[in-house]
Image (tube, helix red, strand yellow):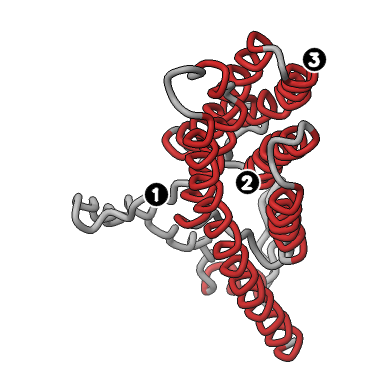
């Protein structure tokens, strides 16, 4: 038998299988996965600059006129002057020339505000719904008080006052009747009627018989007054019929539009 070779002291015995395994199997090395490349800057195309021809125009909302403006204040002033005018006209039964001249002056100022408030409102964009309703009411208050005052003094027939009053009140009622469907604007005939009425009433209020006594016959003054008031009466009745027709048409269109909306819903 062959004697075993002595192993050196301090050397560890390694099994054959383990040694062969360690020498035959290579040591695995950790392979790191490649990192993704950092993304580069993304170029975004700039929006096209609109030219003056293709640029959209901004929507402009029209400003709303304030309720307290110059035009509405003039309308309110006309309403305030109505009782002042009537008091001057009826003082001393309308026989005093001084008081009649004062009444004529107040009436002229009030009538002037009727012209100014509408022009200012349209020129400076101060048209309001209040003004469109209050302006004709102030006109009718001024004209109506003058007619009633003249008739109470016996200088104007009552039937003239009644006819004009019925027309004016009827037109006002028509305005409120169709207010939910729209506003009936004053027509040219209505403006001419107001002008002729104002001139005719001013001639009646002015004490012409006293101022022209001895130079112009009283009958001529009366005929001149009647001529102006007759034209005013014709315009009053004619424009009243026109307002009635326009009110009926406006209401018919409003009712038809309401029915169309309800039917579509």
1 and 3 marks in contact (CB < 8 Å): no
- Residue 203's spot in the image, x, y percent? 54, 31
| Mark sitting on residue 132 | 2
- Quadrant of residue 148 within the rendered picture: top right
In the visual, does 80 lie left or right of 230? right
Residue at the spot x=56%, y=23% of the render?
209
Mark 1 Cα within 10 Å, few/some/many (few <14, many 20+)? few
| Mark sitting on residue 92 | 3
| Mark sitting on residue 58 | 1
Mark 3 lies on a secondary structure that is helix
In the visual, does 54 lie left or right of 31? left
In primary-sequence order, the first of circles 2 and 3 is: 3
- Name the quarter where the C terminus is drawn: bottom right
- Quadrant of residue 22 within the rendered picture: bottom right
Mark 1 lies on a secondary structure that is loop
In primary-sequence order, the first of circles 1 and 3 is: 1
The answer for how far apart the CA atoms under marks 2 and 3 are is 37 Å
- Mark 2 vs mark 3: in front: 3
Residue at the spot x=61%, y=42% of the render?
128
Residue at the spot x=48%, y=19% of the render?
212
- Residue 15's spot in the image, x, y percent? 70, 69
| Mark sitting on residue 96 | none
- Name the quarter where the N terminus is drawn: bottom right
Mark 2 lies on a secondary structure that is helix
For the residue pair 57 and 204, the one nearer the viewer reads as: 204
Mark 3 Cα within 10 Å, few/some/many (few <14, many 20+)? few
The answer for how far apart the CA atoms under marks 1 and 3 are is 65 Å
| Residue 62 drawn above or below residue 14 | above
The answer for how far apart the CA atoms under marks 1 and 2 are is 30 Å
């Amino acid at each position: 038998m062959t004697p075993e070779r002595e192993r050196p002291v301090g050397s560890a015995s390694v099994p054959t299988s383990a040694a062969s395994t360690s020498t035959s199997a290579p040591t695995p090395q950790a392979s790191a996965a490649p990192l993704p490349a950092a993304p580069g800057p993304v170029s975004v195309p700039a929006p096209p600059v609109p030219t003056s021809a293709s640029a959209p125009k901004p929507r402009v909302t029209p400003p709303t006129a304030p309720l307290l403006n110059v035009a509405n204040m003039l309308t309110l002033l006309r309403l305030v002057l109505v009782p002042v005018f009537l008091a001057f006209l009826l003082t001393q039964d309308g026989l005093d020339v001084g008081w009649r001249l004062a009444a004529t002056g107040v009436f002229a100022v009030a009538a002037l505000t009727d012209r100014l408030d509408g022009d200012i409102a349209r020129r400076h964009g101060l048209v309001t719904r209040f003004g469109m309703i209050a302006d004709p009411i102030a006109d009718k208050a001024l004209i109506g008080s003058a007619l009633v005052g003249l008739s109470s003094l016996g200088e104007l027939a009552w039937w003239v006052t009644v006819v004009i009053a019925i027309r004016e009140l009827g037109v006002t009622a028509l305005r409120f009747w169709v207010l939910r469907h729209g506003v009936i604007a004053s027509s040219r005939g209505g403006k001419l009627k107001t002008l002729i009425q104002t001139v005719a009433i001013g001639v009646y209020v002015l004490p012409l018989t006293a101022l022209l006594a001895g130079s112009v016959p009283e009958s001529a003054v009366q005929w001149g007054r009647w001529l102006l008031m007759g034209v005013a009466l014709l315009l009053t009745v004619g424009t009243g019929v026109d307002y009635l027709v326009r009110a009926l048409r406006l209401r018919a269109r409003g009712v038809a539009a309401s029915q169309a909306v309800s039917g579509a819903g």
